[in-house]
Amino acid sequence: MPKLYFILTLFIFNLIRQTTQLTFQKTTIPQCATSQHYDPDVRPKIAVISHDSAISTFAQNPEQGARDAAAILDVQIDWNRHFINSASKMIADIHDAVDNKVAGIIVTIPNEDVLEAVKYAVSQHIPVIAYNAGHAYAEKLGLTRVMIDNFETGKYIAKELMNRGYNRPLVLQITTIKDTSFFSRYQGAAETLGFKPELMAISDSNDTQKAIAQLTSYLEQYTSFDSVISLGGYLGTDIVSSAALDVLNRNSSRRLGVAFFDTGGRNLTTLMNQHPDVFGVSQLPYYQAALPVFLMYLRITTGHNVYNNQTINTGPLLVTNETLSFVRENEQSTLIPLSAKEARIGAILPNAQGDTYNGAIMTGIRDLATKLNWEVLNVVEVRLLEFETLKKKSKTMLTIIKLSSKAH
């Protein structure tokens, strides 16, 4: 079973355990685990408010992740997406969401103007979760954050380049994408390199071929650059991978390292197949949009902020020629990997039968597993021999979830 699938499984069931018991849709949440503000007869409404590049920078559509999670949980999603330059519209929508008394807000925080609106929502006791952008801003407010740390990821990608013997990169940013995330990535890379690398701002302007030709010409003219970094967006990956392929095809003796944020682009696969020093990082945008919906549902129904003031990192996930197909599969729009339409989960819980604490946990596990098309195998009484059998199966067909007993 893929490592990412295993991590996602552990993450979801850990949420269930930490909130005492969670069941979904038509099942009953015990009174002791229910928020005083939760009305089981009212379908919760969650506002998702994001700036444009939280969506447009990816080859896939992360919005689908949030909508798939909402369908599983039977909650309403109001998705509002804006261009970064329309911060005033984002601010207005946050205020409107508060005035309309939504159950929670999931938001990107691309700049300080939006941050002030988020502060207002928090002051009105609306649960808020930040995703995709605004790590430093969200940390100041003590919010749960589902994203990558862009500064640390910038350091990571520069270190990977240096490990491959490259230390003088040209850094590319698409000027049509205005996002503080990219500045943080640049700063992180600069810290690891020990100097501020040259930053080339290039405009796509709906003419990708012109942008590719511009970068190709620059790399051929200035051979002192031994590598190139794309700061993000699938358009950036497309431009960098195409230009690098042209440069290397024209000069087979040249060494050129290529690093990128986010997958996508027409020539990425070809470039990776033909040249070894090409890699990137993924932040798994589909899961980045889906996980906050699960977390917000827990917050709404139980009143517990499970990951209060913590970052749930959705990356960086290293992308190489060997892992590209796996990463792309897990960036597609499904909570179930395309290569496995079903899964078996072994749940080992003592005293899980009847009206018990662990029995309540099993109810939540089974309910969510049904919606994800997973099969849960719960052993009523595990003897040593049976446990050894489960351990053997876990190496071939099962993900094992082991939850220890806890007094209630």
Image (cartoon, rainbow, N blue to C red):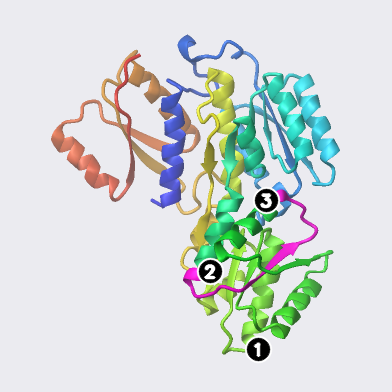
- The front one of 98 and 66 is 98
Does dot 1 land on a helix, a strand or a loop? helix
Residue 186 coordinates in the image, percent (x, y): 65, 59
Residue 161, numbered circle = 2
Mark 3 closeness class: few <14, some 14–19, many ≥20 residues within 10 Å:
many
At 43% from the left and 44% from the top, the residue drawn is 7
User: Amino acid under label 1?
Assistant: Arg
Residue 176: in magenta span: yes
- In the picture provided, is 369 more to the left or to the right than 353? right
With respect to residue 372, does 162 lie above or below? below
Mark 1 closeness class: few <14, some 14–19, many ≥20 residues within 10 Å:
few
Residue 181, numbered circle = 3
- In the picture provided, is 220 more to the left or to the right than 392? right
Distance, label 3 to label 1, CA atoms, is 34 Å
Nearer-N-terminus badge (3/2): 2
- The front one of 369 and 263 is 263
User: Amino acid under label 3?
Assistant: Ser
Residue 321: in magenta span: no
In this rendering, the label closer to the viewer, 2 or 1 = 2
Residue farthest toward the front in the current orientation of the protein: 194
Mark 2 closeness class: few <14, some 14–19, many ≥20 residues within 10 Å:
many
User: Magenta segment, which residues?
Assistant: 161-180
In which image quadrant can residue 202 be found? bottom right
Nearer-N-terminus badge (2/1): 2
- In the picture provided, is 330 more to the left or to the right than 59? left
Residue 250, numbered circle = 1
